[in-house]
Image (cartoon, rainbow, N blue to C red):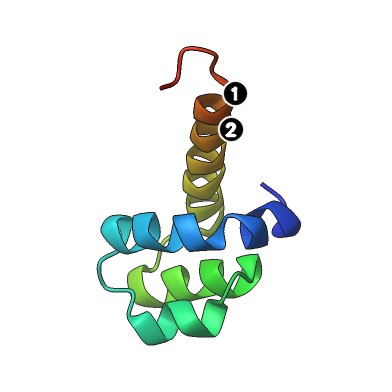
Amino acid sequence: MNAEQFKGKWSQFKGEAKRQWGKLTDDDLTEAEGNYDKFIGRVQERYGDKKEDVMKWTNDWYEKQVDEAGSPTRK
């Protein structure tokens, strides 16, 4: 997922991010406000996760959204 894709999906993404990383505060998410690098930095600060691991999770989440949106059987 690139920065523009991340920004475009921010509204949907931030709820999932809070479920995945419960230590993220509303202030953390407000500060990141769709900025991919800031979001990854916040997760790293709160959890100590590797950048690559956070990026993989965000990419997997994005791909799932794209797959579901493009699925002809989706109701």
Farthest residue to the top: give it: 73
Q: What is the CA distance from the residue labelled 2 to the residue labelled 1?
A: 6 Å
Q: Of the residues shown, which amino acid type is indicated by label 2? A: Val
Residue 45 versus residue 57: which sits nearer the camera?
57
Residue 59 versus residue 11: which sits nearer the camera?
11
**To which quarter of the image does residue 22 belong?**
bottom left
To which residue does mark 1 refer? 70
Asked which secondary structure carries label 2, the reply is: helix
**Label 1 CA crowd tier, 10 Å (few <14, some 14–19, many 20+):** few
Q: Is residue 32 left or right of residue 16?
A: right
To which residue does mark 2 refer? 66
Tell me if residue 51 comes above or below residue 73 in the rendering.
Answer: below
Residue 4 versus residue 47: which sits nearer the camera?
4
| Foreground: disc 2 or disc 1 | 1
What residue sits 56% from the left and 43% below the top?
A: 59
**To which quarter of the image does residue 38 belong?**
bottom right
What residue sits 47% from the left and 75% below the top?
A: 42
What residue sits 72% from the left and 52% below the top?
A: 2
